[in-house]
Amino acid sequence: MEATENSIKLYYNTEVEKLQMPEYGRNVLKMVEQLKDIPDRAKRTEQAQAVVKVMESLNPQVHQQENFAQKLWDHLFIIADYDLDVDSPYPKPVREVVNSKPDPIPLNTKPIRARHYGRNIESILDLIASEPEGETKTAMIRSLAIYMRQQYLIWNKDTVADATIFQDIERLSGGRVRVPEGIELSKISADANFNRPGMNLNFGGGKNGKFNRNFRGKKGKK
């Protein structure tokens, strides 16, 4: 705010230069701008070191990062808009590298054939299909069938026959995985509770008024 004889002028943040590193505040920006006006390089470097110490005290969280000292010097150059001629103990950051965007993560757009089992089921079936026939493969099929039955009961509250799960395994694998004859799944416990994620929360009855999250076991007894 600037006062004159006849008026008072107010300044707002929208009227001033945007801060590149807001965590250090506008006073640090002013210090950095003053560094540029120091004609002697050695003196300019000395003052730059002092500014870095001020930045360290204003942003102590930087200590949690690896190579935090280099991070502070990088921040100094960013605040200076990469226009600061001093002797830095570390390589100067490059604008194009700092401002570069990460490569986009490719998304799997392949439709899920059985949503109640999830997308990863197909990957697991691919793995099992590549296994040679034998006890190990049979054990893998049995474990997968138990997991698929659990997922089925989360989204479909009715009981499900083992044969239905076996048929889904063969169907989703395109016939590459055949369930061996005579395979049996473990019995489901009478008190087993298969709930959708986040649906089995009891917000009452907890001690001291705290939320009581009652996640009951989902594994059946053998």
Image: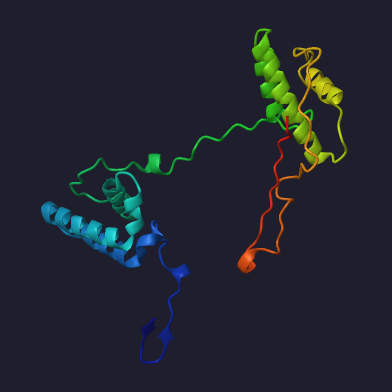
Nearer to us in this view, 10 or 98: 98
Coordinates of residue 92 in the picture (x, y in percent): 27, 43
From the viewer's perspective, tell me whether residue 68 is left or right of residue 108.
left
Q: In which quarter of the image is residue 104?
A: top right
Position of 52 relative to 7 (above/below): above
Q: Which colour scheme is used?
A: rainbow
Please tell me which residue is depicted at 16% across the width and 53% down the height of the picture: 45
- Which quarter of the rendering shows the N terminus? bottom left
Position of 26 relative to 187 (above/below): below
Q: In which quarter of the image is residue 201?
A: bottom right
Q: In which quarter of the image is residue 20?
A: bottom left
From the viewer's perspective, tell me whether residue 92 is left or right of residue 61.
left
Report if residue 94 is visible in the image.
yes
Coordinates of residue 50 in the picture (x, y in percent): 19, 59
- Which quarter of the rendering shows the C terminus? top right
Nearer to us in this view, 190 or 16: 190
- Which residue of the protein is positioned furthest toward the bottom in this rendering? 5
From the viewer's perspective, tell me whether residue 216 is left or right of residue 5.
right
Coordinates of residue 210 in the picture (x, y in percent): 62, 64
From the viewer's perspective, tell me whether residue 145 is left or right of residue 24.
right
Please tell me which residue is depicted at 74% across the width and 51% down the height of the picture: 199
